[in-house]
Image: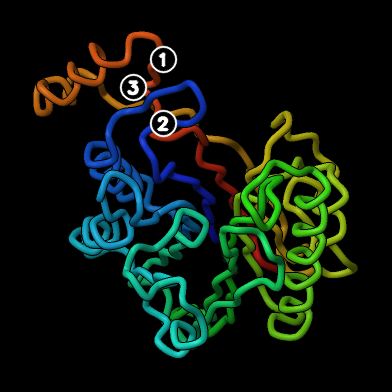
Amino acid sequence: MKYSCMSFNILGVDHAGNELYLPSEIRAEYIAKYLHSIKTDIVGIQEAGAHHRLYDWMTNFSSMISDFNFYDVVKIGDEEAFVKTTTTFSDKKVPLSAGLMILYRKDKFELIERGAHRYSSTEKQERYFQWVHLKDKSNGKDIFVTNTHWSINWDENGKVSKEAGAIHRTKQSNELREFWNNKVGNNVLFATGDYNCFQNSEWIHLAENDIYKQVETATDKDWALGDHIDNIFINPQVSTVEDLRFLHDKIDISSVKARHASMYFWCSSANKDLKLQFERMSDHEPLLVTVETK
């Protein structure tokens, strides 16, 4: 049985560094349509927060996805038992670091169980992973998905610190691997995420063990992806990688200009000193893997 899985950080803000992207309102609509056109079995989304420019990615984007009636959406903010254990969502402004969603094809999978875990790391922005246990409706196969966004190099006060970032990611890799060991076992796993460290980093290798591997090294093939911080882990004992690639699709700017002319040209004229990235959906590109289960 073949399964496809995507990991995509959708950029829950309208800029990244000195680059400016189209406003969230436009990108959210385009990305929702794009994901529906791709029809990947499972998608892990990062940065679907609700804190920037009063635009609520968590609510608006998930609503756009649901309108297509193709994916079911699991949002980290909907986990009632989990919400009671943290203050993160008390003001309904889900922060960037907790803007996690898992999408799965509703015609293909049944949701068995879901949950979320707050990492013990002490970065100023709280960090989490979410998870779902799915069952393939056609063959009864159990599928587990985790989705996460690891820490950057910040300390508890929001100051840049490589040492603090290393400590945070060490805790996160250990806790995520422990969950895989205890919950997933030797079942199919897709572990999507923006891990905020390169694929050859000590933290990525720390998350690996005898069962779970990052998808890029799960086979002997050189996929020639270059350095990247978006990654997917799988269980190569039960899944064989058939295809792995970043998708380089762009936004159709001509249609954006026609429908959002005033907003588009305001961004252009008001931010002449910034590098404009209007054709990109995000500062990340979607990472897509296709596997054949054994």
Tag 3: residue type?
Answer: Phe
Helix, strand or loop for disc 3 = loop
Between 72 and 166, which is closer to the camera in this rendering?
Answer: 166
**Of label 2 and label 1, which has the lower sequence position?**
2
Q: Amino acid at mark 2?
A: His
Residue under pointer 2 = 15
User: Disc 3 designates what residue?
Assistant: 278
Whether residues under marks 2 and 1 lie with C-beta atoms below 8 angstroms apart, the answer is yes
Q: Earlier in the sequence, mark 3 or mark 2?
A: 2
Q: Which color scheme did the rendering employ for the protein?
A: rainbow
Q: Which mark is residue 7?
A: none
Q: Who's the residue at 26% across and 62% down the image?
A: 59
Q: Residues within 10 Å of mark 3 (few under 14, many from 20)?
A: many
Real-space Cα distance between discs 1 and 3? 12 Å
Can you say whether 179 is above or below 19 in the image? below
Q: Position of residue 111 (x, y in %)?
A: 43, 82
Using the rendered image of the protein, determine whether residue 17 is visible from the camera's viewpoint: yes
Asked if labels 2 and 3 touch by Cβ distance under 8 angstroms, the answer is: no
Give the labeled residue for mark 1. Answer: 274
